[in-house]
């Protein structure tokens, strides 16, 4: 049996899941054990493409900087045909990771105070996740003014430029010295993870959605963990179950409650891909999308 038919519109997921391992069975497919992590092969450990006898790897199981790809069926999510493909394309990574971190991993309650450290693609979607969750105060922190302006457009109530003032002090000032109920780190940097922890109120929860480089350690005040009942948790792909939660994101978009039009700020041809990365690094775009004529 297959999930898709020729001609279907689909989103590609970089977290294909096998459906039968321990983690799939307990409803945590984002942690699936059966996918060969880091090997960039199909699920059976092989590659299906080659050039001059050398294998071409399927980067992140989507291999999408190409006109045609071979991907595992488990990483293909059919979507409604009336959703613009350039909008759908961004849901499979940054949108689901950011919105999911807030609404699925942390389950932010209405009226909460939220800080988001790092307002790139994932962080902006933490901001709009916090709006969806009904957070009252959404403090966006970044060191690039353009990214902070994006965050404001996505619903941040307060902006903090971390290059101009201490992020922890600013968050405390904005929360009457208490700290935030929830902090989200979207960079994968031990310094900003620690800032997110220190900006929490007692009993607050830090959710780390940013992927730190392998081998990097995190240091926080050990006493505060117990004495202040703080919580640190990780979020992989927003703890999403791709086949359920990606269609939910698209449903929210079609009902006008999820901003994708504003997020997709530029289009590029494949041969312009390096320009696209440069613009991303300069913080000029929410997301650029490579399109094929
Ligand atoms: Zn599995």
Image: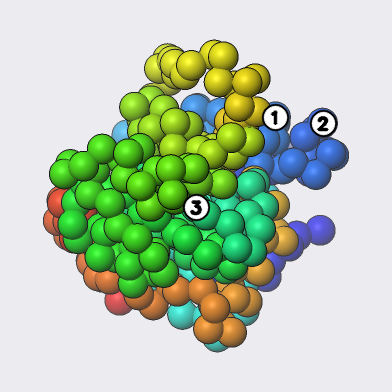
Q: Looking at the image, can residue 288 be seen?
A: no
User: Which element carries disc 1, helix, strand or loop?
Assistant: loop
Determine crowd level at label 1: few under 14, some 14-19, many 20+ residues with C-alpha closer than 10 A: some
Q: Looking at the image, can residue 293 be seen?
A: yes
User: Which element carries disc 2, helix, strand or loop?
Assistant: helix
Question: Sequence-wise, which precedes: disc 2 or disc 1?
Answer: 2
Residue, disc 2: 22
Question: Sequence-wise, which precedes: disc 3 or disc 1?
Answer: 1
Quarter of the picture containing the C terminus is bottom left
Q: Residue at x 66, y 42 (%)?
A: 30
- Residue contact at pointers 2 and 1, CB within 8 angstroms: yes
Label 2 residue near ligand 1, CB within 8 Å: yes
Residue, disc 1: 33
Q: Residue at x 59, y 67 (%)?
A: 134
Residue, disc 3: 114
Label 3 residue near ligand 1, CB within 8 Å: no
Determine crowd level at label 3: few under 14, some 14-19, many 20+ residues with C-alpha closer than 10 A: many
Mark 3 or 1: in front is: 3
Label 1 residue near ligand 1, CB within 8 Å: yes
80 relative position to 267: left or right: right
* Identity of the residue furthest to the front in this view: 176
Instruction: Please say if 229 is above or below 100.
Output: above
171 relative position to 44: left or right: left
């Amino acid at each position: 049996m297959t999930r898709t038919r020729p001609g279907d519109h689909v989103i590609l997921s970089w977290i294909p899941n096998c459906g039968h391992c321990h983690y799939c069975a307990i409803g945590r497919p984002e942690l699936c054990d059966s996918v060969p992590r880091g090997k960039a092969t199909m699920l059976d450990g092989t590659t299906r493409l080659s050039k001059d006898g050398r294998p071409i790897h399927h980067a992140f199981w989507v291999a999408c900087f190409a006109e045609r790809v071979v991907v595992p069926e488990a990483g293909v999510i059919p979507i409604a045909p009336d959703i613009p493909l350039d909008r759908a394309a961004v849901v499979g990574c940054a949108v689901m990771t950011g919105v999911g971190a807030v609404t699925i991993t942390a389950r932010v309650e209405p009226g909460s105070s939220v800080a988001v450290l790092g307002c790139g693609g994932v962080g902006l979607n933490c901001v709009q996740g916090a709006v969806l969750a009904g957070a009252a105060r959404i403090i966006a922190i970044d060191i690039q003014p353009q990214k902070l302006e994006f965050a404001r457009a996505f619903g941040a109530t307060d902006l903090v430029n971390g290059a101009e003032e201490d992020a922890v002090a600013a968050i405390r000032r904005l929360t009457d010295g208490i700290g935030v109920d929830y902090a989200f780190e979207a960079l994968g940097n031990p310094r900003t993870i620690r800032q997110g922890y220190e900006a929490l109120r007692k009993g607050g929860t830090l959710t780390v959605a940013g992927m730190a480089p392998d081998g990097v350690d995190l240091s926080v005040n050990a006493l505060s963990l117990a004495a202040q009942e703080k919580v640190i948790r990780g979020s992989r792909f927003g703890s999403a179950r791709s086949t359920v939660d990606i269609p939910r994101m698209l449903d929210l978009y079609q009902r006008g409650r999820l901003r994708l039009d504003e997020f997709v700020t530029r289009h590029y041809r494949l041969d312009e891909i390096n320009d696209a990365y440069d613009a991303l690094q300069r913080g000029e775009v929410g997301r650029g999308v490579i399109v094929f004529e």
